[in-house]
Amino acid sequence: MSKTPLTVNGAELLRAELQRLKTVDRHSVIASIAEARSHGDLSENAEYDAAKERQSFIEGRIAEVESKLAQAQVIDPKLLDLLNPRHHRLGSNAPFEVISGYRSPKTNAMLRHTTRGVAAHSLHLDGRAIDVRLEGCDTSTLHRAALAMARGGVGFYPHSDFVHLDTGRFRTWGATPRG
């Protein structure tokens, strides 16, 4: 089963919704069903039908949210925090072009098989790495700016024209840019 990238905030919103569905909405609809049943004949009881329909919706939504959370790969917000200082340091407001962000294990295995330098336990698998270019900025300049920050992993891939950034310990690899 593949994972779906999700922000920390998105995961928190889903967890809050799930909590509400299970502790408030579910109990409310059970009370509504009990109230409708107390009116007697259920064959023509619109309140009972509406409550049962609402119960079906709530249980379906609980299953959907639980599934989303089970399949979620929460993206490390510190990863996005790595990008803004690069903009500032380079005096750029241009958008980053994301070459690779979160990777599924299947995609990572395929890349390992077809490309040199792909780690078996890449931080891309944990939503903690991103490969980027910056519009209007040479990747060697972007690489030097990333090195100057001395935060996380910094890889330089001049032949593929991108810079790797991650939230792991500070380390560097790849070609040394000229200039």
Image (spheres, rainbow, N blue to C red):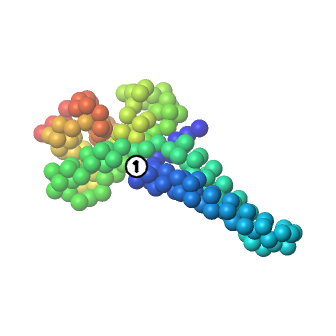
Q: Which residue is mark 1?
A: 8
Q: Position of residue 115 (x, y in %)?
A: 42, 30
Compared across the picture, whether 37 is left or right of 84 comes to right
In the displayed orientation, state which residue is furthest to the left. 179
Residue at 26% in and 46% down: 82
Residue 105 versus residue 73: which sits nearer the camera?
A: 73
The relative height of residue 22 versus residue 146 in the rendered view (above or below) is below
Q: Amino acid at mark 1?
A: Val
Number of marks in picture: 1
Measuring from the top left, give residue 16's x and y in whole percent. Answer: 48, 54
Question: Relative to residue 6, is residue 28 depicted above or below?
Answer: below
Label 1: few (<14), some (14–19) or many (≥20) C-alpha neighbours in 10 Å: few
Q: Position of residue 88 (x, y in %)?
A: 17, 54
Q: Residue 124, can we see it?
A: yes
> Does residue 175 show up?
no
Question: Within the image, what quadrant is residue 31 found in?
Answer: bottom right
Quarter of the view holding residue 162: top left
Q: Is residue 148 left or right of residue 84?
A: left
